[in-house]
Amino acid sequence: MDEGKIEFLRVNRHFRNPIVTGQGSVSSIERLLVRCHLGGKWGYGEVAPWPGFATESISEAVHVIEQSAYQHSNLLKILSLSSNSFPCLRAALFSCSHWEKISRFEGELTSAGLVTPLNASSLHSKWKEGFATLKAKITPTTAVNEVRCWLKDLPDYARVRFDANASLNLEQTRCWLDFVNEENRIEFLEQPLPVGHQEYSHLPSDKIALDESFLTPEMSSWTGTLIVKPLLVGDGLSLLNWIRSHPSKRVYSSVFETAIGRQTALWIAAQDSTTTVHGFDTTGRFQADRLDRHVGGPKTKGLPRFDWNQFWHEIK
Ligand SMILES: [Mg+2]
């Protein structure tokens, strides 16, 4: 009787400590948890926009679900009229319709330790947690010389990624690239310049990863590492087709999803045969809200045999 019905929950999550990025500080985020009744079962998905990424807002996603009269088939028809819109909602609907497979995922991925804020003490405490790759946010005021000293205390085999979140100018980018070239522990500099900056074509793609610039697979011609946030890049089927036909280096990354979105993002990451260290060290960052259920740490596992219908009723 519920066939095709869509329900949603709008939730606010508050970080224990604000996440400081090159674009400013984020102290709370809103998420839209969605479920669709399809084939006699509920499938789950999550709309999880993140500041700095050109996607729809939560309110825009809610509005279009309301326009569909909460019916899955109506919503698909509305979305088919505007092919590049609502990437977060498309990702959530893919998750709902593939939930049976996604919910069974129990594999294990290696994750980089997210160091925030960047300082000597947080860098070394993440290292001690067992992360062999560390990822830190930098801003235009981060002092390269200070970071150089902190890295010297890490073993030679440690790997570090720096993410500027599109906040540097060209001069600052070149300064960081000099550091990347001299320091073997640094794997890459992530998104130094703003999205669409013309100088990207003159920068070394082997030392730079793109994140905010990676909006949809079809639009990307970057030959270096791409940071793929499965919940931001639209329909999962298109994403999986692109993964299978494009042999680029991809790092999969969380956008601080709840357990629903995390299970989806991990499953999608595991469909890529490329093995690398991903970015899922995002659990335990929020004030207790019962929306995280996976265990964190350097090895990131799926959550099979979990009762998602019960989860939904618990958080309602
Ligand atoms: Mg990034």
Image (spheres, grey):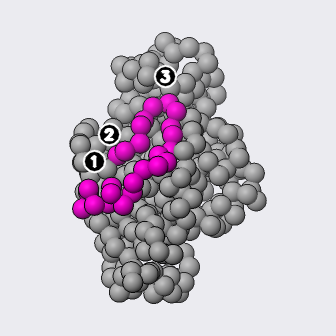
For disc 1, the marked residue is 290
Amino acid type at circle 3 is Gly
Give the position of the N terminus as an image quadrant: bottom left
Does residue 28 sit above or below 6 in this rendering?
above
Q: Residue 285's mark?
A: 2
Is residue 297 part of the magenta span, yes or no?
A: yes
Q: CA distance from mark 1 to mark 2?
A: 12 Å
Q: Nearer the viewer, mark 3 or mark 1?
A: 1
Q: Residue at x 33, y 38 (%)?
A: 284
Bounds of the magenta span?
292-316
Q: Tell me, yes or no, if residue 106 can be seen here.
A: yes
Q: Residue 130's mark?
A: 3
Name the residue nearer the viewer: 132 or 172. Answer: 132
Q: Residue at x 67, y 50 (%)?
A: 272
- Label 3 with label 1: CB-CB less than 8 Å: no
Q: Is residue 75 left or right of residue 176?
A: left
Q: Nearer the viewer, mark 1 or mark 2?
A: 1
- Mark 2, other Cα within 10 Å: few <14 / some 14–19 / many ≥20: some
Amino acid type at circle 2 is Arg
Q: Residue 227's mark?
A: none
Tag 3, which secondary structure?
A: loop
Is residue 302 part of the magenta span, yes or no?
A: yes
- Mark 1, other Cα within 10 Å: few <14 / some 14–19 / many ≥20: few
